[in-house]
Amino acid sequence: MKNKILDLSTLDKEKLMALSVYIEALEEDKKEQLIHVLHKAQSLFGHLPQNLQWFIARKLDLSSAHVNGVVTFYSFFNEEPTGKYVISVCTGTACFVKGANKVLDRILKLTKTTKNKMSEDGLFTIKDVRCIGACGLAPVITVNDKVYGNLKPSDVDKIIEQCRGEDYGH
Ligand code: FES
């Protein structure tokens, strides 16, 4: 199969340089530090598009499939640009049996989006995630770093409204 050409033209040059410097400065076995490099890349670029994943793979001498496998495994990595509010709906077993799917459906409907895609107004990205370790509060969602538990589908209306309010989080 023909190799794809690594097209970096869509990536900010200064940020790419900062990432290169970060990777070069790593002292231990660089391959083992993929997660750290991905965190750094996401903090610089906001998300991890495919060409950025390829760039990282090349720098660390890993396959792009391996890097993509890690990016897609961990819910805190984003391949797409994310909205101001990242809402993670836990669909682990405890949350699932307490109606997490109804909560998820309600949130998707209210934000007029689909999973992992930023809403048109740029406010929301909705994800479903594995158990976040708060099963006693099932069903649970997080909005950025804030946890909401014991939710009913109707509770999410207020949360979405809060997000839309200008003073949310202040
Ligand atoms: S299953 Fe949802 S927090 Fe554990």
Image (cartoon, rainbow, N blue to C red):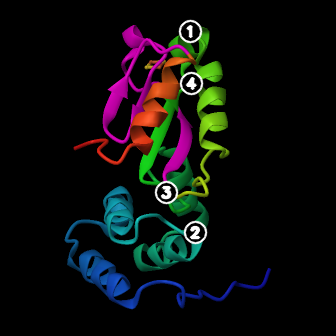
Q: Closer to the N terminus: mark 2 or mark 1?
A: 2
Could you tell me which residue is drawn at 67 percent across and 35 percent down?
109
Q: Is 116 above or below relative to 20?
A: above
What quarter of the picture does the N terminus occupy?
A: bottom right
Could you tell me which residue is drawn at 61 percent across and 36 percent down?
110
Could you tell me which residue is drawn at 57 percent across and 18 percent down?
153
Q: Is mark 4 within 8 Å of ligand 1?
A: yes
Q: Quadrant of residue 101?
A: top right
Q: Position of residue 78 (x, y in %)?
A: 50, 56
Is the residue marked by circle 3 packed among few (<14), some (14-19), or many (20+) residues within 10 Å? some
Q: Secondary structure at mark 1?
A: loop
Q: Is mark 1 within 8 Å of ligand 1?
A: no
Residue at numbered disc 1: 98
Residue at numbered disc 4: 91
Residue at numbered disc 2: 64
Q: Amino acid at mark 2?
A: Ser
Q: Closer to the N terminus: mark 3 or mark 4?
A: 3
Q: Amino acid at mark 4?
A: Thr
Residue at numbered disc 3: 82
Q: CA distance from mark 2 to mark 3?
A: 22 Å
Q: Closer to the N terminus: mark 4 or mark 2?
A: 2
Q: Secondary structure at mark 2?
A: helix
Q: Amino acid at mark 3?
A: Thr
* Res. 62 in view: yes
Where does the magenta region start and end?
123-152
* Res. 76 in view: no
Task: Confirm or deny contact between disc 4 and disc 2 (CB under 8 A).
Answer: no
Residue 149 falls inside the magenta stretch? yes
What quarter of the picture does the C terminus occupy?
A: top left
Q: Secondary structure at mark 4?
A: loop
Q: Amino acid at mark 1?
A: Lys
Q: Secondary structure at mark 3?
A: loop
